[in-house]
Amino acid sequence: MEKLKIAIHYGADAVYLGGEQFGLRAMAGNFSSDEFPAALDLCHRHGVKAYLTVNSYPDDHQLGLLERYLQRMAPLPFDAYIVADPGVLRMVRRISPQRELHLSTQANTINRESALFWQDQGVSRINLAREMTLDGIRTTAKALTIPCEVFVHGALCIAYSGRCLLSSALTGRSANQGACTQPCRWRYSLQEESRPGVYLPIEEDHHGTFIFNSKDLCLLEQLPELISAGVGALKIEGRMKGVHYLAGVLRVYRTALDAYARDPLHYSTDPAWLEELATVSNRGYTTGFLFGDPRDVGQSYQAGYQRSHQLVGVVESVDPDNGTGLVAVRNRFRTGDLLELIGPAMKQLTFTAGELQLQHPDDDTLSATEVVHPNQRLIMPLPAAAAPDDLLRLPQTDCTLPPEVRPSHG
Ligand code: SF4
């Protein structure tokens, strides 16, 4: 629910929500059936559409469970379901015949004939495979009478999105059931057949090897091309991510799209937007397959995630009378730290953390403190422009930013 609020606050037009079953983010802290009505109500009060993800590939023995799940979901006012498996599509048609259906990227639609096939099946939107080029997207969008959607930002697979057995094979958790443990990001070594237990390190550099380690997708600079190619919706991958990632990425793309809509002729990418994308957790950015095979520049040669800022608090409420706010602490900070307050539309203010008043959970009484820790709540002075759901973050002094903020092209 917190991530949903952040997505709405930072400018999403639509969100995709996962239930406890049959979505593709089994470990994402999904909504229970009881929580959906409040989530849908929140979306619709803000004019935001809500789509239910039913885009896993269920086994035959899961069909009974799926049927009961879809029956429970049927009365809820989702704006569409996102499906990938033709069997799931067929079952939704039977249980909720009026339901709008979007085709998931998991269906791996990579050519216009596939797209036309799915259009014939009655889906009202197709999320194209991340592996499509800009030319392919243009040709496909032109051939369709329904909108197509593309992922513009987020993690990439080294297989066709999610069609991968690495996680199943190594951990028993299936990517196709939404339980990928991302073993493509792990480190691998070499073992000679007749010497079990003798591991030979593979070293591309001092961090080890990165044979499967894709950078993250970032198509911020290509928004005008995507819009003129006929793309009707842009999707940001974010449900396994934290609120800082959601806020940072959403406010950049929202601001960019609004700027383009206002004045397409004079639009250009603001370098500050790319810098903002480097503040959130990422593996280095690439334009993926948009311009063809990404080759080695689509690969991350860093050991893991990088980010330049750390989330330290979420503003819960503000008191304009005395210039303070109630803040939920996410990471340690102290009086005197130089913090950034961020909000929608690239609102960004740097200020020094002043007097910190810890709120005691039992009786809400306050006591002065110098340092606060995760899961505490406190009252503190905030810049006048602060609003609920704004975030506080701390630049990381030990951060090594990627040498280039700009995404690499294939
Ligand atoms: S292991 Fe990696 S490539 Fe395979 S599904 Fe998971 S994230 Fe994608």
Image (cartoon, helix red, strand yellow):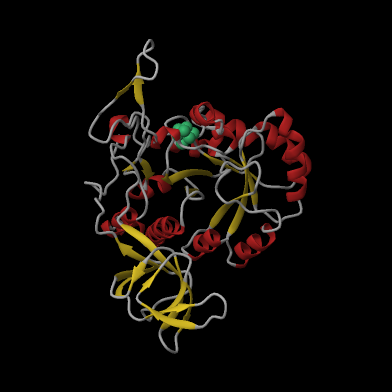
Q: Residue at x 59, y 57 (%)?
A: 49
Q: Is residue 96 visible?
A: no
Residue at position x 33%, y 79% in the image? 354
| 17, above or below 365, in the image | above
Return the residue nearer the eye: 161 or 166. Answer: 166
Residue at position x 65%, y 41% in the image: 22
Camera-side residue: 186 or 37? 186
Q: Quadrant of the C terminus?
A: top left
> In which quadrant of the rendered view does residue 15 lie?
bottom right
Q: Quadrant of the N terminus?
A: bottom right
Residue 70 left/right relative to 48: right
On screen, residue 65 versus residue 149, left or right, reads: right
> Furthest residue to the bottom?
321
Above or below, 112 against 217 in this view is: above
In the displayed structure, 158 sits above or below 3; it is above
Identified at 39% across, 66% down, the residue is 345
Q: Position of residue 120 (x, y in %)?
A: 64, 34
Left or right position of 409 against 223:
left
| Residue with the most extreme top position | 194
Q: Position of residue 156 (x, y in %)?
A: 42, 38
- Is residue 125 in sight in this rendering? yes
Q: Quadrant of residue 395?
A: bottom left
Q: Quadrant of residue 367?
A: bottom left
Residue 194, position as x, y percentages in the image: 38, 10
On the image, the x and y values in percent for residue 110 come to 49, 31
